[in-house]
Amino acid sequence: MDLLARRLLFVTGKGGVGKTTVAAALAQLSAISGRSTLVCEMDAKGSLAAAFDHRPFDFTPRQVMPGLSGMAMNTEDSLREYLRLFVRIPLVARIGPLARTFDFVADAAPGVKEVLSVGKLAYEVRERHYDLVVVDAEASGHIVGQITAPRAIAELVHVGLIREQTQWMNDLLEDPAVTGVVVVTTPEEMPVTETIELIGRLRSQTRVALSAIVANRVLPELFGRRDEEAFARLGEEPARQVLRDAVGDQVDAVLDAARLLVARRRGGAEHLERLASELAGGPPVLFVPELFTRTTGPRAVQQVAEALAAELDIEGGAAGVAS
C-alpha cells in the first residue's frame, strides 16, 4: 500500500536520527503530490517549524506552503476544543477550573493527556479536514504509550461518553489502511538496536501497523570492487609518495578520510542487514542518503523529500519537490 495513501502517519525514532526532518519531508511530499496535509509537532519544541523556516507553530494550524499546514500539540487547548465540541461547554471562562481539575486527574491517571493529543489528531482524520495527517511523534521510548492510550482507557471504561470517544479513536488507529507508524533510524549500532526493540514492542503491545522504516544518513558506496583494489594500492608506498609529490602532503588526509568513510559504510551496511533480518518480510526500508550538509532546515527537508519520492516511486514526486 502506498505509504502516503494512509490518512494518519506517526513518525518516530531514537533522538538524533532525523525524525523531525523525515516527518517534514513526508508532509511536504504529500502536499506536493496533491494531498491536503497537516503536520503536527507533539513536543512543541519548535524543531518542526524550524525545519520549514517558519515561526513557531501553535495549536491553530497555519499554512506552511500550498496544501500543507503545521500545528503544535497542546493538551490544554485540546481539552478546550474537546469540551466545546463534545461536552457543549461554550464559555471559555468556565474551562479554567475544569482545566485545573483536568491537570489533577491527568497526573493521577496516566494516559489521559495522551488520549487528548491522539484524539485531536484522530478527530482531524475522522472529520476529513485533511487527506493526510503526519505526526512528528514522541521518540521511540514513548510512542507505544502514546498510541495505545485510547485502548488502555477503553479497557478501563466500558460504558458512556469516554468509552464511545475512545472506541472511534481505536477504530481509526487500528485500521492499517488508515494509520501507520514510520520508524526512522540511522545505520549505527544503537539506533538500529533501539529500532529493533521498538518493532518488537509495536508488534506485541499495539494493534497499530508498522508501515515503513526510514534508514536515514546512509553513506554512499565510494568504490566498486576494482576501484577498491586500486584505492588500496594507492594507499601503499611507493604509490602514496608519488601522489604526495604530485599534489602535496594533504593527500594523506584525503586517503585516510576515504578509508574511514569506507569502513563506516561497511559497518552501517552490517547494522542495516541485521535490521532487515529482524523485519523478515515486514514493511519496506526506505533509504535516505547522507546529505553532507546541514541536516535541518528547508534545504534538508527538500533533499530528504526528493530521496523519499524516489524510494516511494512517486511519479513526478522528486521533480515536484525539486521545482
Image: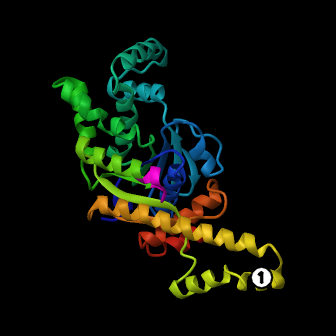
Above or below: residue 194 compared with residue 263: above
| Quadrant of the drawing holding the N terminus | bottom left
**Where in the figure is residue 16, as x and y percent of width and height?**
54, 48
Along the horizontal axis of the image, is 303 left or right of 275? right
Residue positioned 54% across, 36% down in the render: 44
Q: Quadrant of residue 140?
A: top left
User: Which corner quadrant of the image does residue 98 belong to?
Assistant: top left
Give the magenta range.
Answer: 185-192
Q: Is residue 314 left or right of residue 154?
A: right
The residue positioned 61% from the left and 52% from the top of the image is 52
- Residue 267 falls left or right of residue 197: right
Camera-nearest residue between 89 and 208: 208
- Is residue 8 visible to the viewer in this orientation of the structure? no
For the question of whether residue 175 can be seen, the reply is yes
Q: Is residue 246 above or below residue 96?
A: below
Q: Residue at x 62, y 56 (%)?
A: 295
Q: Which residue occupies the extreme front position in the image?
A: 237
Question: Is 102 colored magenta in this rendering?
Answer: no
Observer-nearest of 146 and 222: 222
Element carrying mark 1: helix
The quarter in which the C terminus is drawn is bottom right
In reply to whether residue 186 is colored magenta, the answer given is yes
* Three-letter amino acid code of the residue under disc 1: Gln
Q: Residue furthest left?
A: 158
The answer to whether 282 appears left or right of 267 in the picture is left
Task: State the residue position of label 1.
Answer: 241
Can you give x and y, in whole percent of width and height, for residue 275 in the image? Answer: 36, 59
Q: Quadrant of residue 95 in the image?
A: top left
Q: Position of residue 184 (x, y in %)?
A: 45, 54
Q: Position of residue 320 (x, y in %)?
A: 54, 71
Q: Nearer the viewer, residue 21 or 250?
A: 250
